[in-house]
Amino acid sequence: MRVLLDCAHLNTGGAIQVGIAILENAARTPAHEWHAVLSGRIAAQVPGSLERSLASVVRLPVRNNPWTRYAQIARHLPGIERSIEPEVVFTVFGPAKWRARAPHLVGFAIPHVLYPETDVYLWHKDLRRLLANATLSLQLRWVRRALHNADYLVVETATVLKRTSDLHGFPAERIFVVRNSYSPVFVESLAQVGIPDADRPFSVLVPSAYYLHKNLEIVPAVARELRAMTGADFEFVMTLPPETPEWKGIQRLSVEHGVPDRVRTLGAVPHRELAGRYRRSDAVFLPTLLECSTAVYPESFAAGVPLATSSLDFAKELCADAAVYFDPLSPKDAARALARLMADGELRGRLVENGRRVLRETYPSPEKKWEDQIACLEEGARRGKK
């Protein structure tokens, strides 16, 4: 089977991790002929040895402006497809900005269009957020139209399948479910990480790129409340590039809340170094407001790090009893959850054990996930265009 892997849409965060995992797996699967198109962001993290294991690779230049990226994809991908003539195309995460001639599978994980009832969470009364929400509204309309560039969708939970079908009329029989997992690179990296130094502050990792729905601006307020609750030393460690306006905004909030020494950033962490950051942490904190799925949950379980996350339906479905939950709109409630983790070693141990069990029962191994992805590609190629 000749496959075109469209990684041109991947620009940041967990999407980059998923794309790298697929490319690594493709390189280990010579039974099929793999061609790939890489965005500038993912290309920077893909080693030359991996590229040489694929039939062909096209690297697109880095484009920071999303609309420029969209135009770049729409301009280049159709011609690349014509030159390769694949039997099936897989856009790793969409919605796709182009329509393929071959059967086109599109990964779909955009929760904003699946949870309209949560839009109120994203509404903040300042000009920057008002502009952000106006932009988001335009993007959501465009996303709904772009769904129809897909012959088939690939989603990560049955809940997403049902919501996509019910809310947007996409036929359920054309939606494949491939459950999320952690990448094989993450697991390999874990095996190489030593035991962290115990003589340090309680380290709370916030392993997220910046998106409005990730609710990262709450971190300084949580740090303020946590400092008031406990005399223990702690720090929040984020993964935002230090030159970005989003990180600078969080820095300003840290100063306003009197906790500039409690919130810092590592910058964007390369995928191969991410496991080490988990292992050097005492807890993982994800105050997200919307998700279809997230690699943070299985990565926390695989790394054996206690997790604190939002008390919302998608989180409880994916984490069960392997996390402490909090109201993501209440800094005080979030701080209480972290204070419990800091004070209770037995609770931390129980969460780690529960996480291992949830990982086995809820998440496929990376190898099983790859088998499921290949099965979807083969089935899509067999069924043909829709």
Image (cartoon, grey):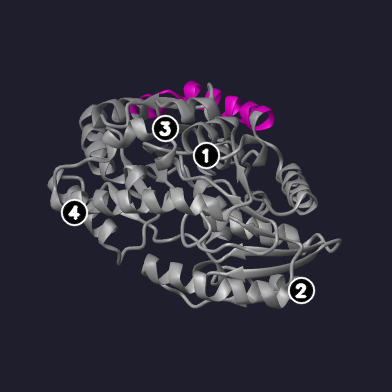
Q: Which one is earlier in the sequence, the residue at label 3 or at label 1?
A: 1
Q: Which element is circle 2 on?
A: loop
Residue, x 67% and y 50% (percent of image)?
386
Q: Residue under circle 2?
A: 55
Q: Which mark is residue 309?
A: 3
Q: Which one is earlier in the sequence, the residue at label 2 or at label 1?
A: 2
Q: Residues within 10 Å of mark 1 (few under 14, many from 20)?
A: many
Q: Disc 3 and disc 2: Cα gap in Å?
A: 41 Å
Residue, x 47% and y 30% (percent of image)?
315
Q: Is the residue under label 3 in contact with that under label 4 (CB below 8 Å)?
A: no
Residue at the extreme right of the image, as rendered: 31
Q: Residue under circle 4?
A: 128
* Side of 110 relative to 222 (left or right): right
Q: Which mark is residue 293?
A: 1
Query: What is the quadrant of residue 357 in the picture?
Result: top right
- Whether residue 177 is visible here, answered yes or no, is no
Q: Which element is circle 4 on?
A: helix
Residue 360 lies in magenta, yes or no? yes
